[in-house]
Image (cartoon, helix red, strand yellow):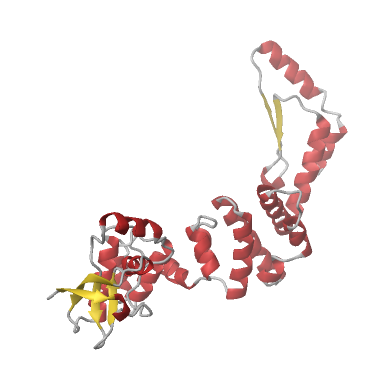
Amino acid sequence: MNLKTKRIYLKNIDFKDKTFLLSYGYDLNPLKQSIKQVGLLNPPILRKKSAAAYQIICGYRRIQALRKLGVSSLTSTIVPSKTGDRESLLLSLYDNTSHREFNPIEKSIALNKLKNYYPEEKIVHDFLPVLKLQPHITQLKAFRPLCRLEREIKDALLEGKISEHTAIQLSQMDRASRRALGKLLIALRLSVSKQAEILDYVSEIAIRENLPIEKLTCTSEMRSILDDEKLNQPQKGEAIREHLRERRYPQLTKKEREFTRNLKQLKLHPYIKLKPPPFFEGNHYHFSLCFKDLEELKKRAQELASLLHNHSLLNIIKS
């Protein structure tokens, strides 16, 4: 490729043309400071698109930073006008991945643009590894929709308010469901595991009750929890999670409450533990004891024996 270096006025660059832009969610301030200190180290790559306009292939952020700094012109690398779009996209891709790792939204943008020129098999084999993704079709299908998410959800992903797994699941929902559930999860700022729990609960309840997700997330119970000024953010998250779990598993949570109430009434020694059957399915209960010598074991055994006619224990076993 015959490359040339030329001084270009910023007014002759078409900033609206984002054909080869692969960046999203960037902060120009560090780049502006770098340019102030040492100047522009790597000239952007442009392609002439008309007699008076140039198209950015690589260096959109660099040019934006110069623009913010009030610079009127810059030294650029110019590719021949006949350079094709596919070749230009590859220049942009490899220029960017050579010095930084893409965030999830940028990976999605790149995959969607590559899809215009290459079959899925080639993208999976050749380009997913370049983007630090496993070369598997499921990765391609998971990441491609991310760039089409609403801006607030994309930004929440990059800010760490929602996880990558959550964003992928949201991208597979209809717009109304995605926005409603995304708004809830962004507000709660939950851990990755609790985000996954709420996603599962909401999806399962919506299917079982044939209820739109956007209605499920704005019930009076949900709003009451979210608007409760006495609860801090973690407490609201836990209350929402418990509310949804109870709605998803009403019989299980009822048995758990009954068990907990009767267990408290038993007033067991801290060294004696009672566990119910998993999910309260079956009739095998498990007592465990902690002791340091035979004398203490004897005391624990006597305490256990004294429970045999305790009404709370009978209630637990009968339930």
Q: What is the number of callouts on the image?
A: 0
Residue 170 visible? The answer is: no
Residue 188 x, y percent position in the rendering? 63, 55
Residue 263 visible? The answer is: yes
Residue 5 x, y percent position in the rendering? 16, 72
* Left or right for 9, reference 210: left
- Which quarter of the figure is the N terminus placed in? bottom left
* Left or right for 138, reference 201: left
282 or 298: nearer the viewer: 298
Position of residue 160 relative to residue 174, above or below, is above
197 or 68: nearer the viewer: 68
Residue drawn at x 20%, y 81% is 83
- Which quarter of the figure is the C terminus placed in? top right
302 or 221: nearer the viewer: 221
Position of residue 20 relative to residue 223, above or below, is below
* Left or right for 256, reference 125: right
Residue 152 x, y percent position in the rendering? 55, 66
* Left or right for 185, reference 103: right
Quadrant hosting residue 84: bottom left
In the current view of this chain or complex, which residue is farthest to the bottom?
A: 51
Position of residue 315 relative to residue 231, above or below, is above
191 or 257: nearer the viewer: 191
Residue 150 x, y percent position in the rendering? 53, 71
Residue drawn at x 58%, y 55% is 195
Residue drawn at x 32%, y 79% is 11
Quadrant hosting residue 138: bottom left
